[in-house]
Image (spheres, helix red, strand yellow):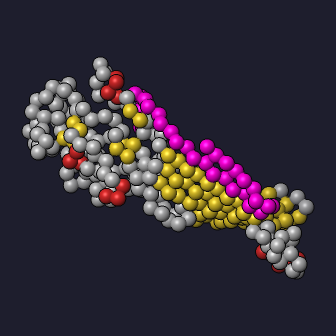
Amino acid sequence: MAATKKYGKNLTFGAGWTWARDLTDTQEASAFGGQVIQNQFDRGAERASNSLVLRHRVYAYAVYALPFGRDQRFLNKTHAIVQELLGGWTTAWNVNLQSGQFFTPSFSGFDPSNTGSFGGRPDRIGNGNLPSGERTIERWFDAAAFKIPGCPDTDPVCTNPANEGRFGNSGLNILEGPGIANLDFSLMKYFNLRERVRLQVRLIMANAFNHPNFAVPRSNIRSVGNVATISSMARVLNGLPATREIDIGLRLEF
């Protein structure tokens, strides 16, 4: 769903919202290889939300020509030099809000299925997703909601799990990571130097407010001291810098 609107001769505004769900048994989350199938005889266990398709994404943009200089509301009768310096500036704003990336709990170090597969998906004994008001970078999800297959519920990461002869029952991508909120800003103007020559001056700010956007948390429940914590910034899904980036440039066109 999207809409655009123009207000007068100076402002153009647009916004859109995507609500999506993509179920697949072939994930595309890795740049180095495809999905690791837990059990080739049970492809239904691999059916899950695509980790690269977010549930919600909202975007909005605005392009606003500042009302100064020739044929504008302000300073339209000032000296030509003033009009040339202060007129003709255009700003652009782009806002991106999106829900978090799906990810999967895991464990390492044991082969409860007796298939030579050390590690994998754990057993799920609770929801795992915390209420939004309880999520922090020190504890993003409830690690106690998962256990290594063969471990008792009271000791989910025991050091000697029973020989279960099966894979963990947790599904893929049942947890949701932090969302992203980003605003980009640009300011630019053309200076006419000659009949067919002009100079563009531009300022571009990616993540203008320097808002922190976090990556998915560590998901290995056997890493007791680190599981569910977040240690890095989000970069992959939207390709944007993790922190604010300011670029100033000149472009000569002829």
Quarter holding residue 111: top left
Which corner quadrant holds the C terminus?
bottom right
At x 76% / y 59%, what residue is drawn?
7
- Residue 20 picture location, percent across and down: 50, 39
- Residue 171 picture location, percent across and down: 31, 34
> From which residue to which does the magenta span run?
1-30
Q: In this rendering, would 62 be left or right of 19?
A: right
14 inside magenta stretch: yes
Q: How many marks?
A: 0
196 or 42: nearer the viewer? 42
Q: Which residue is at the far right?
A: 195
116 or 140: nearer the viewer? 140
58 or 104: nearer the viewer? 58
Q: Is residue 85 above or below residue 212?
A: below
Q: Is residue 184 above or below residue 34?
A: below
Q: Is residue 36 above or below residue 157?
A: above
At x 38% / y 49%, what residue is drawn?
177
210 inside magenta stretch: no
- Residue 90 picture location, percent across and down: 73, 64
